[in-house]
Amino acid sequence: MTDPGIAMVAEPGKAAPRGTAPDLFDKFQPLIDQREALLSTGLTDPFNLVMERVESPTVAICNGKRTILLGTYNYMGQTFDPQVLAAGHKALDEYGAGTTGSRVLNGTYQGHRECEEALKRFYDMDHAMVFSTGYQANLGIISTVAGKDDYVILDIDSHASIYDGCALGNAQIVAFRHNDVEALEKRLKRLPAEAGKLVVLEGVYSMLGDTAPLKEMVAISKAHGAMVLVDEAHSMGFIGPNGRGVAEEQGVLDDVDFVIGTFSKSVGTVGGFCVSNHPKFEILRLVCRPYVFTASLPPSVVATAATSIDLLRGAADKRAHLWANSRRLHGGLKDLGFTLGTETPQSAIIAVIMPDLERGAAMWEALLQEGLYVNLARPPATPAGMTLLRCSLCALHSEEQVGEILGMFEAAGKRVGVI
């Protein structure tokens, strides 16, 4: 029997198959051409900007210039909090730089348990599982809970990690139109009543910064026998009375089976998690492949995360200031004549829609020259083929900085001809 690993290798003395094998990079050629065309104009690479020094959650040195950060997802400004940094230094000194192991082997330290306890306190839930990234949290939970004979019903604008979780678990994907309650209900009605069903939603969608109608969607999902997972990556920390996200704000947190989140946004470090009240939840630690087969987070990271999560429980004033920043920036950009992703501010994300990729890239460069960093987002990551500049506010942006930002947008927009 031929070894399948060498089946395509020519036998000694025999000619190799005719023809030239395609370069596996050929499928990327349109994107390569587009990137080279943009960079040939002298544009700074918007997807490879180097921050030479980070001075605070809101200011860095980029290209040797003081730059206001408006594209970092550092919503609550926890990255430089003295208590957070002290916890990280202490864990680094006491436990070393890394665990060198999986959570189910030698990779669970006391700090991992303390971080999970902090999450349970924050969400007031029975179970918490910490992953090495937020991407892996979605990948792991979705692929483990929903298998090949199950259905995952998801918003068509869902994050890549959600789609990848469906693919890893080989579940049947049923997509519905973005934030369309009626479309969700129609999809659920068509599925077999006896089939396993998981509805996956996001509290805040990261491209346009709009929130989901979770109250209606969770009720419909439950009425059709589906479990519900809500990704609160972009709402944890500042939406809801206690910062627990859109599900809390809309009064349906107790009806949600799984909440997924990340430490790389409001928490200010790196990692991911899932919290749940499901009585069988703990078995996931033995069957969730992205949890079982990945090295755990370093002790210093989980220490900073646990400290930051506890601090977020008492961050009502910061939440209020962040909302004030969001309302002011949204209103100011609208008054200047920019087209925005939402009619009203719904989160800390404000999307400024550009006419096309070329002018979007030019506007991004003009803002960087003014001293402002935002995200340039392009298809296929964006919905409906949009090019947009994504702004993510921080609770530590001062009133003066928001005023500076509006001035920079006005100057850059007029120079590029967007307004």
Image: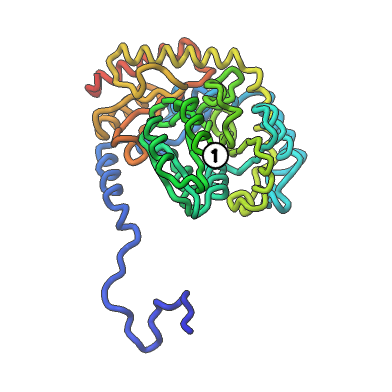
- In the displayed structure image, the side of residue 230 where residue 385 appears, left or right: left
Taking depth in this image into account, of 354 and 92 the one nearest to the observer is 354
Taking depth in this image into account, of 127 and 101 the one nearest to the observer is 127
Q: How is the image coloured?
A: rainbow
User: Residue drawn at (40%, 30%), measured in percent from left and top?
Assistant: 181
* Residue 98 in sight from this viewpoint: yes
Circle count? 1
Q: Position of residue 16 (x, y in %)?
A: 33, 80
Q: Quadrant of residue 76?
A: top right
Q: Quadrant of residue 238?
A: top right
User: Residue drawn at (29%, 40%), measured in percent from left and top?
Assistant: 39
- In the displayed structure image, the side of residue 90 where residue 264 appears, left or right: left
Crowd rating for badge 1 (residues with CA inside 10 Å; few <14, some 14–19, many 20+): some
Does 36 sit above or below residue 409? below
* Quadrant showing the C terminus: top left
Q: Tag 1: residue type?
A: Met
Residue situated furthest left in the rendering: 417
Give the labeled residue for mark 1.
Answer: 227
Q: Position of residue 293 (x, y in %)?
A: 62, 54
